[in-house]
């Protein structure tokens, strides 16, 4: 029997791949979920929580403290074993093969690595109806695209009840765009997953072409994808400044550049806002530095008796200072708008 033909407690082929994604507010709900999953769970669990690339890998220790399951930081090439929780390491995508784990430093998706959607997508493509995808607390709309892929490949979609989530954006986005199978508060999620994992799974489905190619990108198994996903957009990639193509899945808008960076519309908006702020701060710094330098030159000219030169430099300094003030006011208005 192959790794793709694992059987449940009653000898039936079961859903033995559980992929869990969380972001803001996710650590405590993951700990609660891990505590409620039994040691004999007939499935492997894969966990991605969005965090900074350089954030320390504290999540495995936090889960070990509460979970009856074996908890490990995922490593490249590990065999997939039931009763094990595989946690994405810092600055690496966690990906699922048919019977093993990939840990790769592919391009960021939604400005983060590890990212939820690459995990979900890889599991959908390689494990089809074996997969249960779970979206927990988080901001924006991470996980929605990956959950779509899971459903298209025959898997199940489970979402934390938004009313139960500290940050409900991710569950709400999933519910808006995906035909979710189950919605549950975190207190009921463990029992639900135990029940679903023990159920027989339907026959596997052939993955559609685009999810299959997208699953190869974070694994660094495909090169230039120009012309594969959609029409060119007028936007550029905030990560590499390459051109972006627009992808629309059942009304859910995403963007990809030819080097592999990917964004939902909300993630792109956030990235552009950060880019705008950095550009304005750079411009304000330049204006302030030019004002200070002009003041210093004016002082030197005045000390040497060059009154006209000193006056000219003083006027220039005032212009730079006015520019810096305008930019500071622009940042203040932008900050109020974002709030």
Image: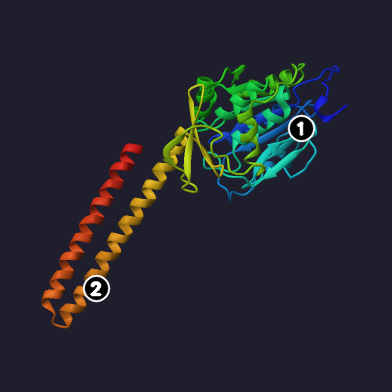
Q: Position of residue 165 (x, y in %)?
A: 53, 27
Residue drawn at x 70%, y 27% is 36
Residue drawn at x 78%, y 41% is 78
Decide if residue 241 is on the left or right side of residue 103: left
Callout 2: SS: helix
- Asked if one can make out residue 74 in the rendered structure from this viewpoint, the answer is yes
Decide if residue 338 is on the left or right side of residue 23: left
Decide if residue 225 is on the left or right side of residue 324: right
Q: Earlier in the sequence, mark 1 or mark 2?
A: 1
For disc 2, the marked residue is 296
Circle 2 residues within 10 Å: few <14, some 14–19, many ≥20: some
Give the distance between the C-alpha atoms of the residues marked 1 and 2, in whole angstroms.
67 Å
Classify 150 as above or below 275. Answer: above
Q: Position of residue 192 (x, y in %)?
A: 68, 19
- The quadrant the C terminus occupies is top left
Numbered badge on residue 230: none
């Amino acid at each position: 029997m192959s790794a793709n033909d694992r059987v449940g407690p009653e000898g039936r082929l079961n859903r033995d791949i559980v992929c869990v994604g969380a972001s803001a507010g996710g650590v405590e709900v993951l700990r609660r979920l891990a505590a409620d999953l039994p040691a004999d769970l007939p499935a492997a669990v894969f966990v991605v929580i969005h965090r900074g690339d350089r954030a320390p890998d504290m999540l495995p220790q936090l889960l070990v403290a509460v979970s009856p399951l074996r908890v490990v930081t995922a490593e490249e090439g590990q065999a997939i074993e039931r009763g094990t929780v595989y946690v994405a390491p810092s600055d690496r995508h966690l990906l699922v093969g048919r019977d093993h784990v990939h840990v790769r430093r592919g391009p960021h998706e939604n400005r983060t690595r590890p990212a939820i959607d690459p995990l979900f997508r890889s599991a959908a493509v390689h494990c089809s109806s074996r997969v249960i995808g779970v979206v927990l607390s988080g901001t924006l709309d991470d996980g929605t695209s990956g959950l779509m892929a899971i459903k298209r490949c025959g898997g199940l979609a489970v979402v934390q009840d938004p009313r139960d989530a500290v940050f409900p954006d991710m569950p709400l986005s999933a519910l808006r765009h995906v035909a979710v199978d189950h919605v549950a508060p975190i207190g009921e999620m463990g029992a639900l997953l135990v029940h679903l994992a023990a159920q027989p799974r339907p026959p596997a489905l052939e993955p559609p072409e685009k999810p299959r190619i997208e699953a190869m990108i974070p694994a660094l198994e495909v090169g230039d994808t120009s012309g594969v996903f959609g029409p060119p957009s007028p936007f550029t990639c905030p990560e590499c400044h390459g051109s972006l193509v627009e992808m629309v899945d059942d009304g859910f808008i995403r963007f990809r550049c030819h080097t592999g960076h990917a964004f939902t519309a909300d993630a792109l908006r956030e990235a552009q806002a950060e880019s705008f702020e950095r550009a304005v701060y750079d411009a304000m710094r330049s204006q302030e530095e030019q004002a200070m330098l002009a003041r210093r030159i004016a002082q030197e000219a005045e000390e040497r008796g060059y009154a006209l030169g000193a006056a000219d430099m003083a006027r220039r300094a005032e212009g730079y200072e006015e520019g810096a003030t305008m930019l500071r006011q622009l940042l203040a208005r932008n900050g109020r708008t974002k709030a």
